[in-house]
Amino acid sequence: MPADVVFHENRYHEPTAEDLEHCYEAMAGATYAGGWFNALRQYFMAGQEYEVREKHWQSALARQGFQVSV
């Protein structure tokens, strides 16, 4: 999805109808192949990308001095 819609600096920017349309276009490949729900379900399934990525985030935050609880 377009970075300017996803990332916000110092405040939240409400997406416009055009912004949302660009997001839908960006997700079209995933939705065509079984639906956005299925893409998210696959991402969050045990042992899949979310869990792998989460371990890296926790490690990086701990190295910066944040208390990370699971």
Image (tube, rainbow, N blue to C red):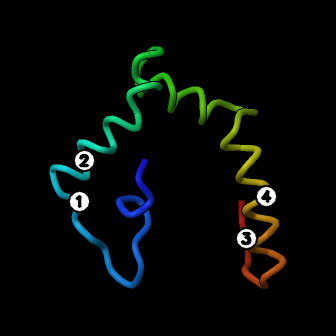
Q: Is residue 12 above or below residue 18?
A: below
Residue at image mark 4: 56
Dot 2: few (<14), some (14–19), or many (≥20) neighbours within 10 Å? Answer: some
**Residue located at (82% from left, 66% from top):** 59
| Three-letter amino acid code of the residue under disc 4 | His
The image shows residue 38, relative to residue 49, as above or below, that is above
Chain-order first, disc 1 or disc 2: 1
Residue 60 horizontal side relative to residue 9, left or right: right
Q: Nearer the viewer, mark 4 or mark 2?
A: 2
The secondary structure type at the circle numbered 4 is helix
Q: Which secondary structure lies at badge 3?
A: loop
Which one is in front, 32 or 56?
Answer: 32
Residue found at x 33% / y 35%: 25
Identify residue for label 3.
68
Q: In the rendered view, would you say 33 is above or below 68?
A: above
Alpha-carbon neighbours of circle 3 within 10 Å: few (<14), some, or many (≥20)? few
* Residue 41 as seen in the image, left or right of residue 37: right
Across and down, in percent, residue 11 comes to: 33, 80
Amino acid type for the residue under numbered disc 3 = Val
Mark 4 in CB contact with mark 3 (< 8 angstroms): no
Please report whichever mark, 3 or 2, sits nearer to the chain's N-terminal start.
Answer: 2
Q: Which residue is mark 1?
A: 15
Q: Mark 3 or mark 2, which is nearer to you?
A: 2
**Which of pointers 3 and 1 lies earlier in the amino acid sequence?**
1
- Read off the residue under disc 2: 20
Examine the image and state in which quarter residue 34 appears: top left
Q: Are marks 1 and 2 in contact (CB under 8 Å)?
A: yes
Separation of marks 3 and 1 at Cα, in angstroms: 31 Å
Tell me whether the residue at label 3 lies in contact with that at label 1, contact meaning CB atoms closer than 8 angstroms: no
CA gap between label 1 and label 2 equals: 6 Å
Q: Nearer the viewer, mark 1 or mark 4?
A: 1
Which tag, 1 or 4, sits closer to the chain's start? 1
